[in-house]
Image: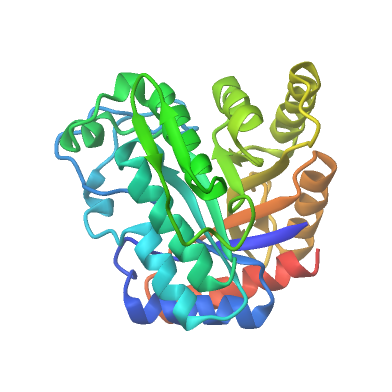
């Protein structure tokens, strides 16, 4: 199993200096990748509910936390220049928010300039008020994502790319540079739904699950393999999972997966591996200072890499 760590491209600790510091430390510790998130604006008066909220009575959140938000692909390009080996991922890029030709060009440029280090995590989005602010219709985000992804794939793969769909038409064009990774950087489709599974089988290289327990991940993995067989997909998808991590000195009775002592975290990692997960992307616990966040990174890397 390989491991990645999210660095803060939003919130009070998000800054150029802090992100470079954490990216370089993650690389020095031997982690495989660093990850950033995606939003463009912080709507006021939100009614949308985060779809992965596991609380018994989920409610709309305060979007103030995403008000100061560094754009993900620009941030990864900046961090590529500050590192040399570590891979660069976004979990997840909201595909319908941006013109697909611009997305394809930016991702290809990132991959080319970084020497083939990009991982392109993609999602359909959930914050309806953000769609409205961008002049987009959230009701069509799934179909738009499918078409936009196919436009990107053709621009990355083909010498002359063209596409005709319901939501986008691309006349015959040439576009370079091509990504270093051929035919394109790994496309990980984010989500736990059957729709995400179908999208991954049709258009992706991996399924990127969000905040599932080992048992839930095992069920999703079994369903994915059955769906792949039914669809006749020759190459199985990779299965990754994004999940928070918190290293503690003592275990607690109510500790969630990847919460607890290093020994417990190693047991959790083994359970995820048995469930079919081959890549873990961990969000660090919240911290009040960059020093505390770096210590959390070091603790998480130690627990994960010894697993």
In the image, residue 141 sits, relative to residue 7, either above or below, namely above
User: Residue 275 versus residue 122: which sits nearer the camera?
Assistant: 122
For the residue pair 63 and 236, the one nearer the viewer reads as: 236
Query: Which image quadrant for residue 202?
Result: top right
Position in image of residue 164 (x %, y %): 40, 25
Q: Nearer the viewer, residue 72 or 51?
A: 72
Q: Which quarter of the picture shows residue 145? A: top left
Residue 278 to residue 85: above or below:
above
Q: Residue at x 30, y 33 (%)?
A: 127
Query: Which residue is located at x 67 percent, y 47 percent?
Result: 257
Q: Position of residue 200 (x, y in %)?
A: 61, 32
| Residue at the image point whose x is 70% and y is 57% from the top | 251
Q: Quadrant of the C terminus?
A: bottom right
Task: Identify the residue at horizontal 58%, vertical 48% (top origin).
Answer: 242
Asked whether residue 216 appears in the rendered view, the answer is yes
Q: Residue 57 location in percent, x, y?
A: 40, 25
Q: How many marks?
A: 0
In the picture as drawn, the residue positioned furthest to the top comes out as 230
For the rendered model, the colour scheme is: rainbow
Whether residue 106 sits left or right of residue 261 in the image: it is: left
């Amino acid at each position: 199993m390989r491991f990645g760590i999210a660095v803060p491209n939003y919130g009070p600790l998000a800054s150029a200096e802090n992100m470079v510091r954490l990216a370089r430390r993650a690389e020095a510790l031997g982690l495989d990748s660093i990850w950033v998130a995606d939003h463009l604006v912080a709507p006021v008066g939100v009614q949308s509910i985060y779809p992965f909220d596991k609380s018994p009575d989920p409610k709309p959140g305060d979007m103030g936390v995403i008000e100061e938000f560094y754009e993900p692909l620009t941030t990864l390009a900046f961090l590529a220049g500050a590192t040399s080996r570590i891979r660069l991922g976004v979990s997840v890029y909201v595909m319908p928010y941006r013109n697909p030709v611009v997305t394809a060009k930016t991702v290809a440029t990132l991959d080319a300039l970084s020497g083939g280090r990009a991982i392109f995590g993609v999602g359909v989005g959930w914050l309806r008020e953000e769609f409205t602010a961008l002049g987009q219709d959230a009701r069509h985000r799934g179909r738009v994502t499918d078409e936009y992804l196919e436009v990107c794939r053709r621009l990355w793969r083909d010498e002359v790319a063209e596409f005709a769909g319901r939501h986008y038409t691309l006349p015959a064009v040439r576009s370079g540079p091509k990504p270093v990774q051929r035919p394109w950087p790994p496309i990980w489709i984010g989500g736990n739904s059957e729709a995400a599974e179908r999208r991954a089988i049709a258009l992706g290289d991996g399924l990127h699950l969000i905040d599932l327990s080992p048992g839930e991940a095992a069920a999703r993995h079994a369903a994915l393999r059955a769906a792949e067989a039914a669809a006749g997909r020759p190459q199985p998808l990779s299965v990754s999972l994004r999940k928070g991590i918190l290293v503690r000195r003592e275990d607690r009775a109510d500790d969630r997966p990847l919460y607890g002592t290093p020994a417990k975290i190693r047991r959790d990692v083994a359970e995820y591996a048995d469930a079919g997960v081959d890549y873990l992307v961990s969000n660090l616990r919240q911290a009040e200072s960059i020093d505390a966040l770096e210590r959390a990174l070091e603790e998480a890397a130690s627990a994960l890499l010894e697993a």
